[in-house]
Amino acid sequence: MLKDITLGQYFPGDTVVHRLDPRTKLLLVIVYIVALFLCKWYVSYAVALAFLALAVALSRIRLKALFKGLKPLIIIIIFTALLNLFYSEGRVLVEFWIFKITYEGIQNAFFLVLRIMLLVMGTFLLTYTTSPIALTDGLESLLSPLKKIRFPVHELAMMMSIALRFIPTLIEETDKIISAQKARGADFETGNIFRRAKALIPILVPLFVSAFRRADELATAMECRCYHGGKGRTKLKQLHYRGRDVIALLLGALLLAAVIVLRQFAL
């Protein structure tokens, strides 16, 4: 299961999506999330799905990698779908004991599951096609107006970049600790829920120790390189909007406009 968590991973490439400005991709993800929450009809979700399919095709990221990222969320998705399926008011189709399945419940469950899947895959596509350094530069550039009110933009962007960078590292470290504990005879799969929770202590303790050690080493390395925040710092790669970025933003605006118009027809 841990190997299925792909958040924070970056797949290098030279596609149109990889070459987009990171600010453009961040804005597109925001627009896509807003569009998903505005979807109200089958056609609206079809438009959002077509937009994601186009982005995936242009990025040449395998669908297997996107669906792999959904595996850790299967329990949450199923639980959310069941809640909407059994506890939505409307035309009752099947009723037994305290549960009832309505037409609106089936519709809500389907739409919610589809929304979560599209949301997760769209967000993962951002990290798959954008390096952590580029994400940091893009986020810092977008939030730069907040510097006028002395908001620590650079520090916030740096923390988010480090967090994304170390997600795969911590997952790999956790997998190694689990394998080492199993080799020593630890059992994480049998017993009741309390016994399983207690069995996680030999994993969590060394994991926290390792995380704090890595954080200390990173802080020491940054101090040795005379890092003092973003004031006066220059960038090796300057961000510039190009024609493909304008086209991508126009497509994002068109998606949002189409979803808003289709929402009016669905009401």
Image: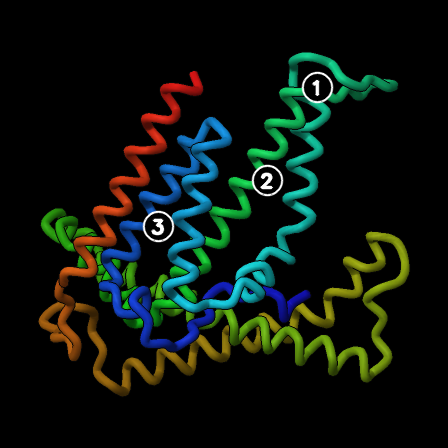
Q: Residue at x 10, y 50 (%)?
A: 148
Q: Residue at x 38, y 26 (%)?
A: 262
Q: Secondary structure at mark 1?
A: strand
Residues at badges 2 and 1 in contact (C-beta under 8 Å)? no
Sequence-first disc among 2 and 3: 3
Q: Residue at x 60, y 63 (%)?
A: 68
Q: Quadrant of residue 189?
A: bottom right
Quadrant including the C terminus: top left
Sequence-first disc among 3 and 1: 3
Q: What's the distance in space between the residues labelled 3 and 1, CA to CA?
A: 33 Å
Q: Quadrant of residue 63?
A: bottom right
Residue position marked by numbered label 2 in the rendering: 113
Front one among 143 and 37: 37
Residue 13 shows which numbered tag?
A: none
Residue 102 shows which numbered tag?
A: 1
Crowd tier of the residue under label 2, counting other residues whose Cα lies within 10 Å: few below 14, some 14–19, many 20 or above = some
Front one among 37 and 167: 37
